[in-house]
Amino acid sequence: MAHEACPLPGEVEKSERAAIARMLAGKRIAIVGLSDNPARVSYAIAEYLISAGYEVVGVNPNAKGRVLGKECYASLKEVPGVIDVVNVFRRSEYCAAVAREAAEVGAKGVWLQSGILSAEAREIARRAGMDYVEGRCIMVEHGRRGRF
């Protein structure tokens, strides 16, 4: 199921390759839009990332309590501690707000999943000095490059 929503990516530019490598080297990933439904792609990717050794933190105001045995927060501002990567499963029109919040909490990077693009989120991340990737699946990229 996850592979259907995460097609193999196209060519990677040098600057994007560096951003991908830095984000995959992170340890803690906040997944914005993490679903508590095991049939959803965000859930499958969270499971994969946990199995690959990442600490995954769910962010979804609609998920009540825990997802995958871990506390799920209503916003990035509620997440305690450092966030290395904000992995986004939201429609494009919401991504700028997510990028702003990621900058406010000091996240190191923002990653919009396959099919999600936002010029405004990209500019917010650039101005904040955060790494930025869009339209790529973090699970596919991890599998292609291995653990950094």
Image: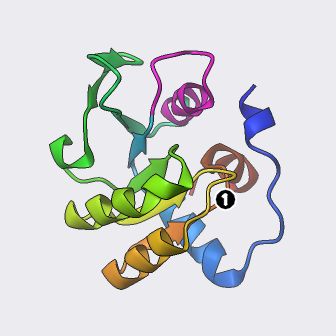
- From the image, which quarter does the C terminus lie in? bottom right
Q: Answer with left or right where residue 44 lies relative to residue 90.
A: right
Q: Mark 1: which amino acid?
A: Gly
Q: Is residue 73 left or right of residue 111?
A: left
Image quarter of residue 52? top right
Residue holding disc 1: 135
Most distant residue in the front direction: 93
Q: What is the magenta range?
A: 34-50
Residue 25 drawn at (x, y percent): 48, 59
Residue 13 falls in which quadrant of the image?
bottom right
Picture coordinates of residue 34 (x, y %)? 45, 32
- The residue sitting at 48% across, 31% down in the picture is 50
Residue 25 appears in the rendering:
no
Residue 27 on image: x %, y %: 39, 49
Q: Nearer the viewer, residue 73 or 91?
A: 91
- Residue shown at the point (44%, 53%) measured from the top left: 94
Give the quarter of the image for residue 75.
top left
Indicate whether residue 106 is drawn in magenta. no
Color style of the picture: rainbow
Q: Position of residue 59 (x, y in %)?
A: 34, 37
Q: Residues within 10 Å of mark 1 (few under 14, many from 20)?
A: some
Q: Is residue 122 visible?
A: yes
Marks counted in the figure total 1
Asked whether, in this view, residue 76 is left or right of residue 80, the answer is right
Q: Secondary structure at mark 1?
A: loop
Compared to residue 121, the image places residue 56 above or below, namely above
Which one is in front, 72 or 120? 120
